Amino acid sequence: MDTARSKGDSVERTVRTPDGRTLAVEESGDPAGRPVLVHMGTPNSRHLYGPNVRDAAARGLRLISYDHDLR
């Protein structure tokens, strides 16, 4: 993982793939919860929808979403 920063209850980070691409990742929900990989479809972004995050946290889940980092 290259960088990480906290944004409210979410954590955003970048991850370099073995082929050199950089993915931007957002995690939210219960930090100790069971991880759930979320992809809302294309085109979309890694940003998670607030009601989904609250529901996941209440159920003990940690949502993880990603997109291509354009920085």
Image (cartoon, rainbow, N blue to C red):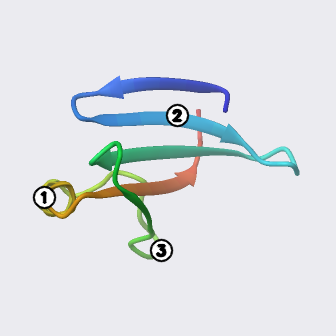
Q: Looking at the picture, does residue 8 appear above or below residue 29?
A: above
Q: Which residue is mark 3?
A: 42
Disc number for residue 13: 2
Horizontally, residue 55 falls left or right of residue 40, namely left
Neighbours of disc 2 within 10 Å: few (<14), some (14-19), many (20+)? some
Of mark 1 and mark 2, the one earlier in the sequence is 2
Q: Quadrant of residue 16?
A: top right
- The amino acid marked with disc number 2 is Arg
- The amino acid marked with disc number 1 is Ala
Kindly identify the residue that appears in the image at 59 percent across and 32 percent down: 71
Horizontally, residue 32 falls left or right of residue 39, namely left
Q: Position of residue 57 (x, y in %)?
A: 19, 54
Q: Quadrant of residue 46?
A: bottom left
Q: CA distance from mark 1 to mark 2?
A: 23 Å
Residue pushed farthest bottom? 41
Of mark 1 and mark 3, the one earlier in the sequence is 3
Q: CA distance from mark 2 to mark 3?
A: 21 Å
Q: Looking at the picture, does residue 18 appear above or below residue 8?
A: below
Q: Which residue is mark 1?
A: 58
Across the whole image, how many numbered discs are drawn on residues? 3
Disc number for residue 69: none
Q: Check disc 1 and report its element: helix, strand or loop.
A: helix
Kindly identify the residue that appears in the image at 15 percent across and 53 percent down: 50
Q: Position of residue 45 (x, y in %)?
A: 42, 57
Residue pushed farthest right? 19
Of mark 2 and mark 3, the one earlier in the sequence is 2
For discs 2 and 3, the disc positioned in front in the rendered view: 2
For discs 1 and 2, the disc positioned in front in the rendered view: 1
Q: Position of residue 65 (x, y in %)?
A: 45, 57
